[in-house]
Image (spheres, helix red, strand yellow):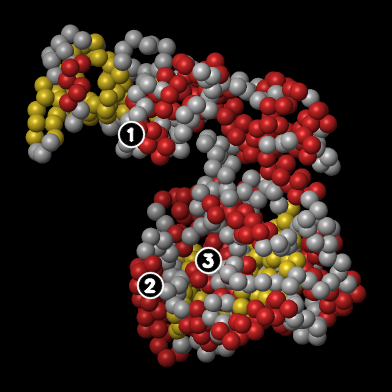
């Protein structure tokens, strides 16, 4: 039988249905999966001397058993194994809980190597496991992610078995030149040293090799896909009417910033090209992304094409509709709003208009590209703060026969390391300039104890006729608690402010029409204060609001705080943001300080990434952030850049497509040679 690294794990001895099931849970199906199920940390198994061990430290001790192990039972099905060992003339008590099977190893006179937690007062080692003696060359032990269904030791044994049988079949498609240039170890060496490292240097090199490979393969795939997109002829050539676009810009009450102009040009170039646009427009809150979207919508319309403009919430969709109506006041274009709360009759009319082409642009939530919405000629999809528009949505559209250009807009400043991984196949345009005259929002951090003074400040703003947002704490685990919190907070504010102010309430459990009613009242200044959960996070535009208060601010990400703060400072008046927080620890305090000191969304995002990792940043999971086994885009940013540079170089070289040395790598990336004329 031909053996291959892709054999199922069931070929190993001791792997029956139950084990297969347990391994599958860990994402392990094949021998390759098993061999690349790398440890996530290593324990130091060097035997330690007792006098240098601190209380509660996890250590390995070695000594001669002074007696056989005594097993005693207590409680329901609980037991304890106790014995003493002589460690270099110190008598140590050892206790193991609920591992009765260890008893047979503990016999008077045996040399034992025990890993456990040291209790300094009782001179006792609370045992975790008994290690085998004898293999002195290995002083670290790999620790794996596992589940209740399968033990560390079992996993390790299976990996050992897989290695012993299959290591001759481990292939390496990394070209020799790269192995040398980046000092990578071969795949075989890498796998061995990840699991059974004999020195720190070996382990370090193996880890570096894994990380480099992970980034490199991923970047190769991304950049390859991007090249293909660039060369696909499936898009629409939108031959827009330049004069009508120019007169639109002239009709605006302001001149575009240089950054806006640049981005509009980039977008228009994409529209005109016959390849499908796939562009992300990044611009801090208030940088003026909406007008860029408007320009693209109008461009499409001048060529008789339709646009679907998607916002994450109904409130935002309604606001976009309003902004567009205002900008298109003197322009001959038909824009409709279609959301979950659009009445049946109106909805039917809009659907008809989209199908017969009398509507040029429809604004709404993501339902716009789902269920029974048919377009006469959908050529452009714009999504605002909508990271959910991913591969599946694009596929759904393709299947309907649409190949629209896609424009993503986000105020979330995306650090470079993220943008070249999660968003790597897109082109990115950055609006890195604010409209003239924008003042940064003055931001303060106070402790909850100073709530009274805050109320004084709120009253001062209200007396000027201004309005105030209050954001209630975020308790992600519980919507019910969010609701309780936000309601209690409304009562607190209404109580403190008395008849001077009308305090409104907005939260995620309200129906869309309830929300809209509240927002309309706030917009009309019938409500002076709006207490809300983060549902108002993005996009809402009420220029008369000058103060943003955020409770339990330390629970939010820095980028998110910045977004919230962006709800104020939208008018001509001086605006403020007050963060209320009692953070534990220095790091928490530092985070609050950073927000008060910088108004640059990019800096904050970078800090966020540094301090919290990429895991919880803006729904990245949905956007298709790859899950690397070891690589961390933050900690390994330097390796990421190297790998990316190399991937670009290689994909732009002739040899890569021609030479046999790269065949394995081409295969890995999924490149079939007759696709080749893709060089830039
Ligand atoms: P965001 O990028 O946060 O979506 P908006 O598009 O809502 O920002 O723009 C914020 C505000 O700035 C709007 O009131 C808009 O009319 C205004 N604006 C946009 N571009 C300019 C500009 N070049 N000069 C002055 N004001 C502008
Ligand atoms: Mg916006």
Tell me the distance, in whole angstroms, between the alpha carbons under discs 3 and 2: 26 Å
Marks 1,2: beta carbons within 8 A = no
Q: Is residue 447 visible?
A: no
Q: Quadrant of residue 476?
A: bottom left
Residue 335 sits above or below residue 194 on the image? below
Question: Is disc 1 placed on a helix, strand or loop?
Answer: helix
Tell me the distance, in whole angstroms, between the alpha carbons under discs 3 and 1: 57 Å
Residue at disc 1, CB closer than 8 Å to ligand 2: no
First reached walking from the N terminus: tag 3 or tag 1: 1
Q: Give the residue furthest to the front.
A: 1
Tell me the distance, in whole angstroms, between the alpha carbons under discs 1 and 2: 44 Å
Residue at image point 61% right, 82% down: 348
The residue mark sitting in front, 3 or 2, is: 2
Q: Is residue 16 visible?
A: yes
Question: Is disc 2 placed on a helix, strand or loop?
Answer: helix
Q: Position of residue 198 (x, y in %)?
A: 47, 16
Q: Which residue is mark 2?
A: 483
- Residues packed near mark 3 inside 10 Å, few (<14), some (14 to 19) or many (20 plus): some
Residue at image point 50% right, 82% down: 513
Marks 3,2: beta carbons within 8 A = no
Residue at disc 3, CB closer than 8 Å to ligand 1: no
First reached walking from the N terminus: tag 3 or tag 2: 3
The residue mark sitting in front, 3 or 1, is: 1
On-image quarter of the C terminus: top right
Marks 3,1: beta carbons within 8 A = no
Q: Position of residue 649 (x, y in %)?
A: 77, 34
Q: Which residue is mark 1?
A: 18
Left or right: where 101 falls relative to 455: left
Q: Which residue is mark 3?
A: 444
First reached walking from the N terminus: tag 1 or tag 2: 1
Q: Quadrant of residue 140?
A: top left
């Amino acid at each position: 039988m031909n053996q291959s690294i892709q054999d199922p794990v069931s070929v190993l001895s001791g792997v029956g249905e139950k084990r297969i099931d347990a391994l599958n849970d860990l994402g392990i199906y094949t021998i390759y999966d098993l061999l690349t199920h790398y440890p996530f940390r290593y324990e130091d198994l060097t035997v330690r001397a007792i006098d240098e061990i601190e209380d509660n430290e996890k250590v390995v001790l070695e000594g001669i058993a002074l007696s056989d192990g005594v097993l005693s039972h207590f409680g329901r099905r609980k037991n304890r194994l106790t014995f003493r060992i002589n460690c270099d003339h110190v008598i140590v008590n050892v206790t193991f809980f609920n591992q009765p099977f260890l008893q047979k190893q503990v016999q008077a006179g045996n040399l034992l190597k025990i890993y456990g937690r040291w209790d300094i007062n009782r001179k006792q080692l609370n045992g975790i496991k008994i290690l085998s003696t004898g293999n002195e060359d290995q002083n670290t032990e790999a620790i794996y992610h596992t589940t209740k269904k399968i033990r560390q030791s079992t996993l390790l044994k299976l990996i050992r078995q897989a290695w012993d049988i299959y290591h001759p079949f481990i292939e390496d498609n990394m070209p020799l030149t790269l192995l040398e240039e980046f000092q990578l170890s071969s795949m075989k060496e890498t796998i061995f040293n990840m699991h059974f490292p004999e020195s720190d240097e070996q382990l370090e090199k193996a880890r570096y090799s894994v990380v480099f490979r992970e980034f490199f393969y991923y970047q190769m795939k991304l950049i390859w896909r991007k090249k293909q997109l660039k060369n696909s002829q499936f898009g629409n050539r939108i031959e827009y009417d330049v004069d009508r676009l120019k007169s639109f810009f002239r009709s605006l009450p302001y001149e575009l910033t240089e950054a806006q102009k640049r981005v509009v040009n980039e977008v228009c170039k994409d529209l005109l090209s016959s390849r499908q646009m796939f562009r992300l427009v990044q611009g801090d809150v208030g940088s003026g992304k909406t007008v860029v979207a408007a320009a693209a919508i109008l461009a499409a319309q001048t060529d008789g094409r339709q646009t679907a403009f998607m916002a994450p919430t109904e409130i935002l969709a309604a606001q976009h509709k309003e902004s567009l109506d205002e900008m298109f006041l003197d322009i001959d274009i038909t824009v409709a709003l279609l959301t979950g709360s659009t009445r049946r009759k109106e909805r039917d009319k809009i659907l008809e208009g989209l199908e017969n082409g009398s509507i040029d642009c429809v604004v709404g939530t993501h339902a716009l590209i789902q269920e029974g919405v048919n377009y006469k000629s959908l050529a452009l999809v714009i999504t605002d703060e909508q990271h959910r528009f991913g591969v599946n949505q694009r596929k759904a559209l393709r299947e309907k026969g649409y190949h629209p250009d896609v424009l993503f807009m986000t105020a979330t400043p995306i650090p470079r390391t993220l943008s070249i991984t999660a968003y790597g196949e897109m082109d990115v345009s950055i609006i890195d300039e604010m409209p003239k005259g924008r003042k940064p929002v003055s931001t303060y951090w106070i402790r909850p104890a100073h709530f009274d003074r805050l109320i004084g400040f709120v009253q001062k703003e209200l007396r000027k006729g201004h309005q105030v947002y209050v954001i209630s704490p975020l308790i992600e685990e519980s919507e019910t608690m969010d609701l309780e919190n936000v309601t209690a907070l409304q009562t607190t504010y209404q109580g403190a402010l008395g008849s001077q102010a009308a305090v409104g309430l907005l939260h995620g459990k309200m129906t869309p029409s309830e929300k809209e009613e509240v927002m309309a009242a706030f917009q009309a200044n019938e409500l002076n204060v709006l207490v809300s959960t983060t549902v108002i996070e993005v996009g809402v535009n009420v220029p008369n609001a000058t103060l943003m208060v955020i409770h339990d601010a330390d629970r939010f990400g820095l980028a998110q705080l910045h977004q919230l703060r962006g709800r104020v400072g939208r008018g001509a008046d001086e605006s403020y943001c007050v963060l209320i927080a009692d953070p534990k620890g220095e790091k928490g305090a530092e985070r609050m300080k950073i927000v008060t000191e910088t108004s640059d969304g990019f800096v904050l995002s970078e800090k966020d990434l540094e301090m919290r990792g990429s895991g919880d940043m803006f729904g990245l999971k949905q956007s298709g952030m790859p899950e690397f086994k070891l690589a961390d885009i933050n900690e390994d940013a330097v390796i990421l850049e190297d790998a990316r540079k190399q991937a670009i170089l290689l994909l732009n070289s002739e040899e890569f497509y021609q030479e046999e040395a790269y065949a394995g790598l081409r295969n890995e990336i999924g490149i079939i040679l007759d696709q080749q004329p893709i060089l830039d």
